Amino acid sequence: MNRASLALFGLLLMSPAAANAQAPAAKAPAEKLSADYSHEPFVIERYATIARFENDGTGEETLRVRAKIQSDAGAQQWSELVFGYNASTEAIDVHYVRLHKADRTTVEIAADATKDAPAPTVRDFPAYANCKEKHIAVASLAPGDTLEYEIAKRIVAAEAPGEFWFEHRFIDSAVVLDERLEISAPSTRTLTLKSSPASTYTSQTAGGRTIYRWKRANLKPAAGDSQKTADQSKAKSPDVQLTTFASWAQVARWYAKLVQAAAQPTPEIRAKTQDLIAGSATDLDKIRAIYDFVSKSIRFTPLTFGAAGYQPRAAGEVLTSQYGNSEDKNAILSAMLQAAGFSTETALIPSSRKLDAAVPSPAQFDHVITVVALAKDLIWMDSTVDVAPFRMLASGLRKKAVLLIAGDGAGK
């Protein structure tokens, strides 16, 4: 990693009682902690994630980290902490950042070292001004220092009121002597909780809440290119997934309402659509003409699904601004197709990993494409790639399972 840009927040069907029955005890790492890691640029001595969710869909995730810096390269990598968040639904609190220096003194990082900034991908797109990053400069970090911090991200407005979801990958790209995960949820909620075979956990119910705990370590130094390692990690299923959605049909009904609200054909969209399809000889020609306009004339903003919030922007606004992420481009493409007399469907798709059908969670998706049923055929369209021919999908989207959502909310 170039800098300590650590993600905060990520979520199968199991009653709390069943979860307790299936919770094996955590196993201690096989390797000894006395191994020689002196050649590592840094060693993470402790990395703890504590997530707490409430019935209304709000919650908080706290990250506590302690890392020993062992080289100039390590100091450079940790000299700036960066945490992304959506300011419309989330807030980040910096509880403390401190350095334990090699001479045994402790330095508290001052509050003025923390700055808010727009996420780099949205600086030219004011509609996504809520996509922010919290930057914390650790200017005096040096080899021999131990960096310690605690950061909390709060969900202040639920994206799906009454529901929550989460997923977590344990660190495998650096030496971590002790990694903990704790999830606290109301004991009255039925959760779908899935943990990988290597990620055993314990659970305890008391005081109206059930707490799930994991303990891991990664004692093998990372090898190879860091970006390649990060891409490989994204392609793997998370170690832990949790969701309160009981079925994919429920997820589909939730997201269909968001699309319906955004994909309303305005008079301007209807007029533009009629201009686009004038002279088209067939229905397929009409669909192609509309796709070509949205694909080539509406600039794509490369934001992962949900990064700017799950509610797409209104189609009319997207037409005026001439840019949009995959959710927004699906909204305007759907609105225009509806204005031309076609029924559309929305496909939520994971581009970098395989969909786990057992876990009905929005966290699995990172992209949105548009579908039209024409005769007995389905027309699949990804309008985010402006140079792609009509009906051509990028290789990462082919042969993938998707959640297909009809306009009336039916999902499969």
Image (cartoon, rainbow, N blue to C red):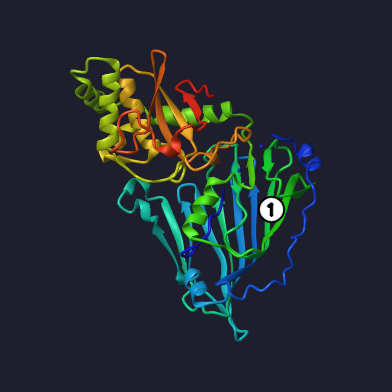
Q: Going by the picture, which residue comes out furthest to the top?
A: 375
Q: Position of residue 370 (x, y in %)?
A: 39, 29
The image position of residue 34, as x and y in percent, is 72, 72
Question: Could you say which quadrant of the image residue 94 lies in?
Answer: bottom right
Residue 322 visible, this orientation: yes
Q: In terms of depth relative to the viewer, which is nearer, 309 or 324?
A: 324
Question: For the C terminus, which image quadrant?
Answer: top right
Q: Left of 121 or right of it: where is 151? A: right
Q: Compared to 51, does 179 lie above or below?
A: below
| Residue 12 placement: quadrant | top right
Q: Is residue 253 above or below residue 111?
A: above
User: Residue 323 at what x, y percent from top left?
Assistant: 30, 41
On screen, residue 48 above or below 232: below
Residue at image point 56% right, 50% down: 9
Q: Residue at x 48, y 53 (%)?
A: 85
For badge 1, the amino acid type reads Glu
* Observer-nearest of 292 and 126: 292
| Image position, residue 188 (x, y; %) | 73, 38
Residue appearing at x 57%, y 60% in the figure: 173
Task: Say which element carries label 1.
Answer: strand
User: Which residue bears the numbered disc 1?
Assistant: 182
